[in-house]
Amino acid sequence: MKKLLLLSILLSGVSQAQFFEDAKPTKIDTLKGSNTEFRNFWDVKKYDIALEPNFETKSIKGSNKISLTIEKDVKNPTFQIDLQQPMKTDKISASFPISEKKIDGDFIFLTTKKNFKKGEKYTIEIDYSGNPQIAKHAPWDGGWIFTKDKNGNPWMTAADEGIGASIWLPVKDIWSDEPDNGITFRIITPKDLVGVGNGRLIKEENLGDKKAWLWEVKNPINDYSIIPSIGKYVNFKDTFNGEKGKLDLDYWVLDYNLDKAKKQFEQVKPMLSAFEYWFGPYPFYEDSYKIVESPHLGMEHQSNVAYGNNYGNGYLGRDLSGTGIGLKWDYIIIHESGHEWFANNITAKDQADMWIHESFTMYSEPLFVEKYMDKTSAEKYVQGVRQMITNDKPIIGSYGIRNEGSGDMYPKGANMIHTIRQVINNDEKFRQILRGLNKDFYHQTVTTQQIEKYFIDKSGIDLQSIFDQYLRTVKIPTLEYKQNGNQLTYRWTNVVPNFKLPIRLTGGQELRPTEEWQTATLKSSDELKVDPNYYIFTKKS
């Protein structure tokens, strides 16, 4: 899922998006980002979505039937549904009596005069239409894309991870509530085009000069992953023999790119094999694995990976690490598919914890390299991406207002995980922790604290100060030292209080620095060299 914001800025040399100064949160920010009194008493179970885009007018119309369960006893509550302007509601109905309907900016409020009991089940259905916000530079900003392929055929899709799915679809637009029983998604297109959604295609229907494509997702899905793609697509299929049996592979590409796609997508099976090794089974066997060609670079839409990397290796032909290693594989296939485990299987409850998606997924890149090249290349790669770290602000954002932290969640977060791997110093234990995360938090939304506690409990190591250092500050641990022959005096500086990060030197000798000066006798008189797999600085004084 991802905005690739920082990566885009660093690669292009020109900012395609702005890092805005933090402002005081508004009531609207809270309504969008918090589990408020209008949201906290009901749980989404399923979305049944219908959509018809109009290329000529750059408009869409559709409906969403929201099936829900009441989570606690509540009297005369108000339900909040999100639908961002300039989209408009045409009709609202529910299986419970509505005493007042109020449209207030980007929100729909449905007030009731009824006592609801925990466990009761209801539906809300909303018909909607309008001209959605147009993305100026997807996927880094949110909105719809109405463009044409090189043959002049209409090509349409949306990107909305940051701004929210409610930019085009009426939903409960908060990361912590996914439709537990999945979705159905009916896309109506001109008869000469194809509508591709998430999950599996279960029905095609001819409607005169139009055609309907019905897709179904059986698993929970985050709202921003629900994406339609409409174009002159052709389809080819394959299968992967994975840990849970046969996984269907489904590819939808523009007709004139079929041969290129068949060659480039050969990387999918090695990728799946590597990630199942490190993370456990692909999390959505029931919904298949799918890549859909998109008019933007890429996004991790669940069981519906958007691909726009021009059928070449690297990141638009570049290597993020500067080592050459990143040119040996297709960045979008590897990275966006890694999100199926971290973002789609394990989803952060709040956007402030988006590092859970991006740090682990960027670290999936060297893990892929390690499995299909070698460990030395993987280490060079993850060390190489440090060139992108800016340390502009903490990786964790502000909670409850749809605010993500620094783009450093990609390279710095990956290097934090790599550093923790060095502390654990047992690759098999580390791998089992990654697999355990995906098993024990299977199809769940989580917090940073849950992930931290899991690593600490499963490793048996107090890692809390390491998480605090890299996630909650912009300070990089600095090993200050004095050396006289084989006599070393050393300490940590620029660290959080009681920072606990044991380190190894290149010769294997271990040091356990504190903020107080310590002494050690080195194995040789050679100049001190710390194992470069730790993301720290050194300073000789």
Image (cartoon, grey):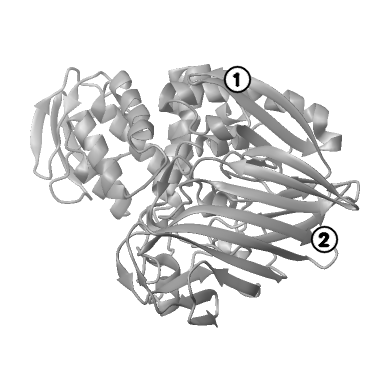
Give 262 or 127, whichever is nearer the viewer.
127
Residue linked to disc 1: 240
Q: Is residue 331 left or right of residue 207?
A: left
Viewer-side residue, 103 vs 148: 103
Q: Which residue occupies 82% across, 27% down?
A: 259
Q: Residues within 10 Å of mark 1 (few under 14, many from 20)?
A: some
Q: Position of residue 433 (x, y in %)?
A: 31, 29
Residue annotated with mark 2: 55
Query: Is residue 5 something that shows in the picture?
Result: no
Q: Give the structural element (helix, strand or loop) at label 1.
A: strand
Asked whether residue 251 is in view, the answer is yes
Q: Quadrant of residue 55?
A: bottom right
Residue type highlighted by circle 2:
Phe
**Label 2: few (<14), some or many (≥20) within 10 Å?**
some
Q: State left or right for residue 190 relative to residue 405.
A: right
Q: Is residue 334 above or below residue 400?
A: above
| Spatial separation of the CA atoms under disc 2 and disc 1 | 36 Å
Q: Relative to the observer, which residue lies in front, 389 or 314?
A: 314
